[in-house]
Image (cartoon, helix red, strand yellow):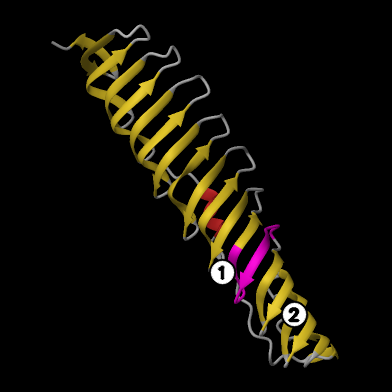
């Protein structure tokens, strides 16, 4: 079960060629304010230093992207905004024309990621908020969910724990709006291994789970402290253990 299918579109590497050989069409493109246009549609308007964009300016790329922000040595460096033709917007820090540092990107479908970027992709701490509801707060690695975080679903489920390949995997706790709560081991988004389930009536079931279903031998502990342990069939304790 992949948790953040839409996150892959955030794995962007923004490339901006050095502009030292551009033809100046207006102003001072050596040391001052100037404009240039290239045959491929590349445009820049802003401040220059030693023949390269340096300081603040606006760049239009042939693919329709637009960058507004700081430049150094011909590259996007510092704080800036990049707007894409499909509606995607990135606001944050740049280094060598890539997202590096803190930033926020809004995807075409309205999902919003805020956090740390390394070489154009989310890496480090961050938060993803989904347009349809729900969010993920935690670690990111190379544009994907990292190994730990908190996932909230649109219907109010909350998972806190370990992840692998963008699925619940390892140790974690899931809470449901009806009061149920499972704590234990997970694999590929399902209960797998030793775990404990607290039911809405506050009774507690402990045992081993396989592919999301209680199996083997389990125990149900009631609110009054009494308990029943037995064999499990089809997810239910059906025979008291001797």
Measured as percent of width and height from the top left, residue 58 is found at 77, 74
Q: Residue at x 72, y 93 (%)?
A: 50
- Magenta span has 91? yes
Q: What secondary structure predominates along the stretch shown in magenta?
A: strand
Q: CA distance from mark 2 to mark 1?
A: 22 Å
The correct choice, above or below, for 115 with respect to 137 in the image is below
Query: Mark number for residue 55?
Result: 2
- What residue range appears in magenta? 86-101
* Upstream in sequence: badge 2 or badge 1: 1
The mark tally for this picture is 2
* In the rendered image, the vertical position of residue 136 relative to residue 154, given as above or below: below
The answer to whether 48 appears left or right of 230 in the picture is right
Q: Looking at the picture, does residue 130 appear above or below residue 177?
A: below
Q: Position of residue 15 (x, y in %)?
A: 60, 75
The mark found on residue 185 in the picture is none
Label 1 CA crowd tier, 10 Å (few <14, some 14–19, many 20+)? few
For the C terminus, the quadrant is top left
Question: For residue 130, what is the image quadrant?
Answer: top right
Query: Does 57 lie within the magenta span?
Result: no
């Amino acid at each position: 079960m992949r948790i953040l299918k839409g996150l892959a579109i955030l794995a962007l590497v923004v490339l901006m060629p050095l502009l030292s050989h551009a033809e100046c069409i207006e102003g001072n493109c050596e040391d001052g304010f100037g404009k240039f246009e290239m045959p491929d549609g590349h445009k820049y308007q802003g401040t220059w230093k030693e023949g390269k964009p340096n300081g603040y300016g606006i760049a239009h790329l042939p693919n329709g992207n637009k960058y507004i922000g700081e430049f150094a040595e011909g590259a996007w460096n510092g704080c800036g905004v990049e707007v894409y033709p499909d509606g995607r917007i990135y606001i944050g820090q740049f280094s060598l024309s890539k997202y590096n540092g803190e930033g926020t990107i809004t995807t075409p479908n309205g999902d919003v990621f805020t956090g740390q970027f390394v070489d154009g992709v989310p890496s480090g701490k961050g938060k993803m908020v989904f347009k349809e509801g729900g969010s993920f707060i935690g670690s990111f690695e190379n544009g994907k969910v990292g190994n730990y975080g908190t996932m909230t679903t649109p219907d109010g489920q909350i998972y806190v724990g370990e992840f692998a390949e963008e699925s619940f995997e390892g140790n974690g706790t899931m809470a449901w709006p009806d009061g149920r709560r499972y704590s234990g081991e997970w694999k590929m988004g399902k209960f797998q291994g030793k775990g404990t389930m607290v039911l809405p009536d506050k009774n507690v079931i402990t045992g081993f789970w396989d592919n999301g279903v209680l199996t083997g031998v389990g125990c149900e502990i009631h609110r009054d402290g009494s308990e029943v342990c037995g064999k499990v069939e089809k997810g239910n304790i059906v025979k008291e253990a001797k």
